[in-house]
Image: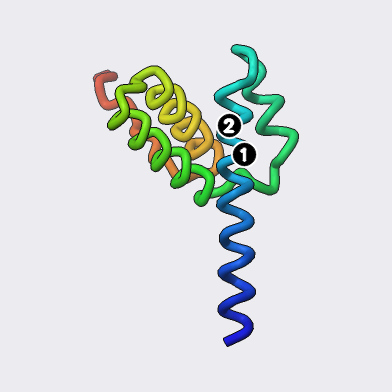
């Protein structure tokens, strides 16, 4: 039982860290997003991407389309880097 509570606390701490990182991304000057992300590589994982998409959905519901699109773009780029986003080969090239 203690292990479960410990995991829950760690989970909540990680979620808080994700939200703080997202807040930093939203507040940083344009073009400095890579530096913000590189400063906390331990947080770049599927959980961050999931949290970004949750925040993006909330933004969309609140009418903040720019914020939503920004987070979706960053989440997609991170997912590609982590190999979580499928690369679809271009099949238009017919030789």
Q: Are marks 2 and 1 in contact (CB under 8 Å)?
A: yes
Residue in view at x 27 percent, y 26 percent = 91
Quadrant occupied by the C terminus: top left
**Image quadrant in which you'd find residue 8:** bottom right
Query: For the point 62% across and 84% down, which residue is it?
Result: 2
- When the figure is inspected, residue 42 is found, relative to residue 39, above or below; the finding is below
Which residue is located at x 45 percent, y 22 percent? 70
Q: Nearer the viewer, residue 50 or 3?
A: 3
Neighbours of disc 2 within 10 Å: few (<14), some (14-19), many (20+): few
* Residue 44: quarter of image: top right
What residue do we see at 50% from left, 49% from top?
46
Residue furthest front in the image: 62
- Mark 1 surroundings: few (<14), some (14-19) or many (≥20) residues within 10 A: few
- Assign a secondary structure to mark 1: helix
Q: Report the Cα–Cα distance between label 2 and label 1.
A: 5 Å
Q: Is residue 82 above or below residue 70?
A: below
Residue 81 in the image: x percent, y percent? Answer: 55, 37
Residue 76: % across, % down: 44, 33
Q: Is residue 79 left or right of residue 56?
A: right
Q: Position of residue 92 (x, y in %)?
A: 25, 20
Percent coordinates x, y for residue 23 in the rendering: 58, 31
Dot 2: what SS?
helix
Q: Quadrant of the N terminus?
A: bottom right
Residue annotated with mark 1: 20
Q: Is residue 65 left or right of residue 49?
A: left
Labelled disc at residue 6:
none
Residue located beneath label 2 in the image = 23
């Amino acid at each position: 039982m203690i292990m479960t509570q410990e995991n829950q606390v760690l989970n909540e701490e990680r979620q808080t860290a994700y939200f703080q990182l997202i807040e930093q991304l939203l507040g940083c000057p344009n073009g400095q997003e890579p530096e913000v992300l590189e400063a906390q590589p331990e947080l770049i994982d599927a959980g961050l991407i999931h949290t970004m998409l949750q925040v993006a959905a909330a933004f969309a519901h609140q009418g903040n389309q720019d914020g939503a699109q920004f987070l979706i773009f960053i989440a997609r780029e991170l997912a590609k880097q982590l190999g979580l986003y499928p690369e679809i080969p271009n099949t238009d090239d017919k030789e």
